[in-house]
Amino acid sequence: MNPIGLYAVGLLGPGLEDFESARPVLAGEAPLTSRDVQIPPPGLLPANERRRTTATIRLALKVAEEATEGADRSQLRSVFASSSGDMDIIDRICDALTHPEPVVSPVQFHNSVHNAPAGNWSIATRNPAPATALSGYTASLATGLLEAATLQLTEGGEVLLACYDVPSMETFAHVRPIHHPFAVALRLGPPEGAPWRLQLAFGGDVPADRCRVDELEALRDSNPAARALPLLEQLARGTPGHVTLQAPLGRSLSIQIEP
């Protein structure tokens, strides 16, 4: 692929409240202090819509807001990628269906669809531009990045990628063990004038890169969205480098990074 520009990053995870404050941790200059993730309410949504949001929606919108700070959100195309979607809502609906008289909350059903965060983002930003919602299982980050990069290269302009996953509920934990919420957003655009340039290339069955810091590696392994951490480590160091991510169908995604 031709190079694309990376203009801004949004981040939220255990001990990682936003990208700027997390830079020393990601660069290996400060320890990761793990703590519960506090997901703030979406600042862009009207109050009525804000009250109906789930943790998954709030998580996705938090990093999307951070990555698009100062940008024109009203025409920004977007890609929302999640391995498992809203696990909490799915768990509640599945539990309701086991009862003799199953009753599913209309609000829960409304938020159970995979594109709920993308829809709320469009409402929050009053944005009529296309918004894609997708899943690539454990490779959802690479899947979303490929989709967003393809949009940018074919249509120009800027594209937002948000990748996120919330913890599995008890019902699903033994088959889909996700232990911590994590989300990352990348605002992509033309390479000219961007703080970073990314060159993407498909590869064969090459192992994905691990984090340099053990605590970050444990986090990377605990949430599909946290597969972004080796890329974020390289961005935080501010030097040229190369990162390999797991891609769908047993392939890999190679990313060359140039500040």
Image (cartoon, helix red, strand yellow):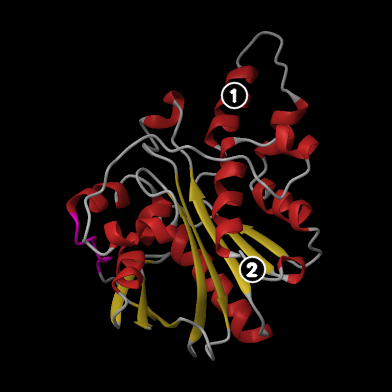
Q: At 54% from the left edge and 91% from the top edge, which residue is drawn?
A: 192
| Disc 2 secondary structure class | loop
Q: Relative to 245, say whether 168 is above or below.
A: above
| Dominant secondary structure (helix, strand or loop) of the stretch shown in magenta | loop
Q: Quadrant of the C terminus?
A: bottom left
Residue type, label 2: Gly
The quadrant holding residue 73 is bottom right
- Frontmost residue, 79 versus 95: 79
Magenta span contains residue 111: no
What range is drawn magenta here? 207-213
Q: Relative to 144, say whether 120 is above or below.
A: above
| Disc 1 secondary structure class | helix
In percent of width and height, residue 179 lies at 36, 36
Q: Relative to 37, say whether 152 is above or below.
A: below
The quadrant holding residue 202 is bottom left
Q: At 62% from the left edge and 35% from the top edge, which residue is drawn?
A: 54
Q: Which residue is mark 2?
A: 70
Magenta span contains residue 208: yes
Q: Is residue 78 visible?
A: yes
Q: Relative to 82, say whether 57 is above or below.
A: above
In percent of width and height, residue 17 lies at 43, 48
Residue type, label 1: Arg
Badge 2, how many Cα within 10 Å: few under 14, some, many 20+?
A: few
Q: At 39% from the left edge and 31% from the top edge, which residue is drawn?
A: 173
**In the figure, is residue 102 to the left or right of 82?**
right
- Frontmost residue, 146 versus 161: 161
* Res 60 label: none
Q: At 22% from the left edge and 48% from the top edge, which residue is drawn?
A: 215
Number of callouts in the render?
Answer: 2
Q: Which residue is mark 1?
A: 92
**In the figure, is residue 178 to the left or right of 194?**
left
> Which badge, 2 or 1, is on the more N-terminal residue?
2
